[in-house]
Amino acid sequence: MCLAVPSRILEIHTDRAKADFGGVHRTISIQLMPDVKVGDYVLVHTGFAIGKVDPKEAELTLKLVSKMGDLSPVRLLKPDQWGKE
Amino acid sequence: MRFVDEFENPVLARKLIAEIAGMATKPMSFMEFCGGHTHAIMQFGIRQLLPEYVRLMSGPGCPVCVTSQKDIDRAIALSQFPGVLLTTFGDMMRVPGTTYTLQEASAAGSDVRIVYSPMDAVRLAQEHSDRDVVFLGVGFETTAPGIAASILQAARLGLKNYFVFSMHKYTPPAMRGILDGGEVHLDGIIGPGHVATITGSNAWKFLPLEYHMPVVVSGFESVDILLTVRMLVEQVMTGKAEVANAYGRSVFPEGNVVAQRIMDQVFQMADADWRGLGVLPMSGMAIRPEYSAFDAEVRFEIPDVPSREPPGCRCGEVLRGVIEPPECPLFGKICTPDTPRGPCMVSDEGACSAYYLYQTEALG
């Protein structure tokens, strides 16, 4: 029930918007996100935009993961220090 | 689809699996709060990809599953009031009540309609002014703001025939219930990403502060979940406990403040009865007196029928992480998605349904 799907806002009509779900267009409510703009990506749950999807943050996460292994290893505790810090 | 496909990249997933295997050098158990995560973890086969001493267990994050037997029975009873048009999300239809399901009530003459959005229920109320349209409000913080918005919409439209039966629940009290119960040992929590889209990651600060429990808020694709596990392993191995966010594209510390305000305008905290966890103080969302004209519990005298959970069903223990679905003697034998005995096998977020769908598939 907490399933939410990313979509892109195509048109805004007061408290509703037409949104693109990978080629399928649906009308959604933007009452929970009144500041949304055309072109924004949002998560849609039960017909409501509930939060933005930030392309810059998405890029940062992907970059972080693709660089993993190249970074210096995290400092690990020795077994006798587990749970003591 | 953008923001889905990139986060299912197998190259990145393999990288994360290698990181986890290299970092985790002692046994550790993490609970995914959210039933959506349980389904994604089973679907991607993540449990099998992790080192065997990194264990994931499913938690209470399935709103239909945690709805008490009494509330299920009362929802079914509501459908039988003369003139009622009952609207619900699809998950509720096949949940076994003490004597029958909503689907069976519908076959016997109740007018029950599945809607995608509570706004569809408001539209039905506009179209059927001679009927009492009741919406079954089931869900956590992700869902409750939209249902609150539907009540505000009905108020703006001056509707006198739209009612919500509010069974909504707050997620933090359930996490406290699990930790206070002490039945399962946990080293970290996979935080519910879409609940946190609304509440903000700050809502989970009590876990490190009060329980010294690491929590990482997660998205729902394979890379999201593996990154979350990797971040949890790092916290455990370095002895840290903090709220971290692996779902940066949609979760922010403060959350969706507009949605929070709308939710708080319509609902107030009340004690609520959870399947598997019992009555948890201040864990439910009751409709505020200002909006009692839209409260199904005020409009209808819902009969108090004697409720009994399905005999043999261990959904409650599954929700607390005490057993895994296959440990229930009914699982896969007399309880299947076609013949569900309890809600954990019915709901798209139920752990039993996830294990049945993906595990039995994997076993051939």
Image (tube, rainbow, N blue to C red):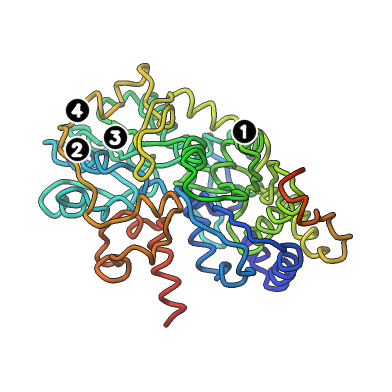
Q: Earlier in the sequence, mark 1 or mark 4?
A: 1
Task: Measure the C-alpha gap from mark 2 to mark 3.
Answer: 20 Å
Residue type at tag 4: Phe
Q: Nearer the viewer, residue A30 or B82?
A: B82
Q: Are marks 3 and 1 on the same chain?
A: yes
Q: Which residue is mark 4?
A: B300
Q: Residues within 10 Å of mark 4 (few under 14, many from 20)?
A: few
Q: Is residue A65 left or right of residue B110?
A: right
Residue type at tag 1: Glu
- The location of residue B275, given as percent across then percent down, is 34, 44
* Contact check, label 2 and label 3, Cβ < 8 Å: no
Q: Residue at x 34, y 60 (%)?
A: B345
Q: Secondary structure at mark 4?
A: loop
- The location of residue B4, given as percent across then percent down, is 62, 62
Report the mark closest to the observer, 4 or 3: 4
Q: Earlier in the sequence, mark 4 or mark 3?
A: 3
Of all chains, the one bearing label 2 is: B
Q: Which residue is mark 3?
A: B126
Residue type at tag 3: Gln
Q: Residues within 10 Å of mark 1 (few under 14, many from 20)?
A: few
Q: Which residue is mark 1?
A: B210
Q: Earlier in the sequence, mark 1 or mark 2?
A: 2
Task: Measure the C-alpha gap from mark 4 to mark 3.
Answer: 20 Å
Q: Which residue is mark 2?
A: B78
Q: Residue at x 43, y 49 (%)?
A: B320
Q: Earlier in the sequence, mark 3 or mark 1?
A: 3
Q: Is residue B323 left or right of residue B246?
A: left
Q: Earlier in the sequence, mark 2 or mark 3?
A: 2
Q: Are marks 2 and 3 on the same chain?
A: yes
